[in-house]
Amino acid sequence: MIGGGFAGLAAARRLGGHPLEVTLVDQHNFHTFLPLLYQVATAGLEPADVAYPVRTVFGRDPNVMFRHGRATGVDLEARLVTLADGDALAYDHLVVATGAAAQFSGVPGAAEHARPLYTLGDARRLRNHLLATLEAADAHPESFDGGAPVFVVVGAGPTGVETAGALVELLDVCIRRDRLRIDPGRSRVVLVDAGDSVLPSFRAEAGRYAAGTLTGRGVEIRLAHPVAEVSPHGVRFADGQWLTAAAVVWAGGVTVDGTFAATLPVAKGRGGRIAVGHDLSVTGHPEVYVVGDAAAVPALPGGPAAPQLAQVAIQSGDHAARQILRRVAGVPTNPFTYIDKGIMAAIGRRAAVAQPRRGPVVRGTLGWLAWLGLHLVYLVGFRNRLTVLVNWFWRYLDWPSGPRLIVADAETEP
């Protein structure tokens, strides 16, 4: 198994307890609960609240071993995976679940100056930058255009919507509870997107509710505004408009390019996603499976690719492991079929949209509670669930004191 995200963990869990030797390789020794990274970035949760040691996850599965390392290449004919330290691991079956990375779509300056939100390191660095910026605005408001910081979030999908809503709440609590001297009328959170709707993957009514709620909470929304350039001081739109910003958060999509999966010498599709067969194996190499965000996982046999969601990752990882067990048993593999359990997005405290596969969209406080419940179910580790539950309970009543700590080496991390 290469990758300890949702897909890799699901595959390893399915193989746990079977008479197989399973090695899970990841450059981090922890699993990250990606859907809550934006809360770490906006000081709602601590990094440890959304991460859990991989070795602890498989503490009761003696056949599952963890190898801390970074996979750099694979020899499909020799069935060897090479690691950055020079070691090589032989395999009979290989599951590649290395996820994706931020996609900057060739926008000049975006990779250098925008701040993605796809890893725990991204979230920690963004939190430090946001909090340091607010402290600087308190001490030297004259250094900011308009006298207060402007934060731009690029991408009006779930990550962008959740981040924009959380940024407004962070500004509010820093002013109201921490008494930072920042003019709330001048500080701004701007959500921009090249498309013409908020939450485009949701039904129109969910997008309208999200847009209305964000606007009501002070978020400025600019749709049909593709970003043409990102600089250290702001963004330039395709129409030539310039917007000064203290931080540009990039939530504009993901790509497999640049990840380990991209090194596989096999066919690739849109966004670099690996083309896989009906059982999620690679054509010509039935012993190799690619799952999760790294693959163009078919929602139905022969159908279009499923969205890059946590549920798709979990289900595809589990399916790949089941097929390995079938191959070991000498029986044919089965095609993968995605079970759509709906999608959700939080807009802020007491506001979320939950869209089931069938039935009406649930929104507002009820949607928020549904969102909380689902995320608690899938959050790894009892301690993490308890910590997050207590934190969210206080947030429901009123924003708590929160972990608004700037923890960084000032000489190496802004």
Image (spheres, rainbow, N blue to C red):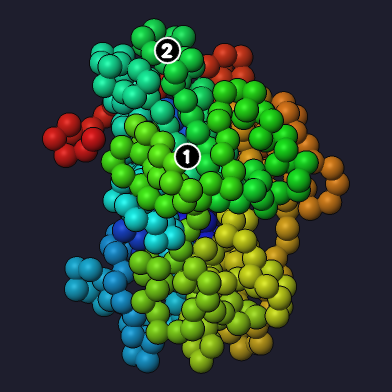
SS state under label 2: loop
Tag 2: Cα neighbours inside 10 Å, few (<14), some, or many (≥20)? some
Of the residues under marks 1 and 2, which one precedes in the sequence?
A: 1
Q: Amino acid at mark 1?
A: Val
- In the rendered view, tell whether residue 403 sits above or below residue 414: above
Amino acid type shown at disc 2: Asp
Farthest-out residue, left: 411
Q: Camera-side residue: 231 or 379?
A: 231
Residue 153: numbered disc: 1
Q: Is residue 367 left or right of residue 146?
A: right
The answer to which image quadrant residue 235 occupies is top left
| One can see residue 120 in this view | no
Q: Is residue 211 visible?
A: yes
Q: Quadrant of the C terminus?
A: top left
> Image check: 236 left or right of 271?
left
- Nearer to the camera, 46 or 145: 145
10 Å neighbourhood of mark 1: few (<14), some, or many (≥20)?
many
| Vertical position of residue 275 compared to residue 25: above or below | below
Which residue is pictured at 64% across the width and 48% down the height?
196
Return the x and y of residue 17 as percentages of the image width and height. Answer: 53, 65
Residue 98 in the image, given as x and y percentages of width and height = 43, 64
- Element type where label 1 sits in the image: strand
Q: Return the residue at label 2.
A: 183
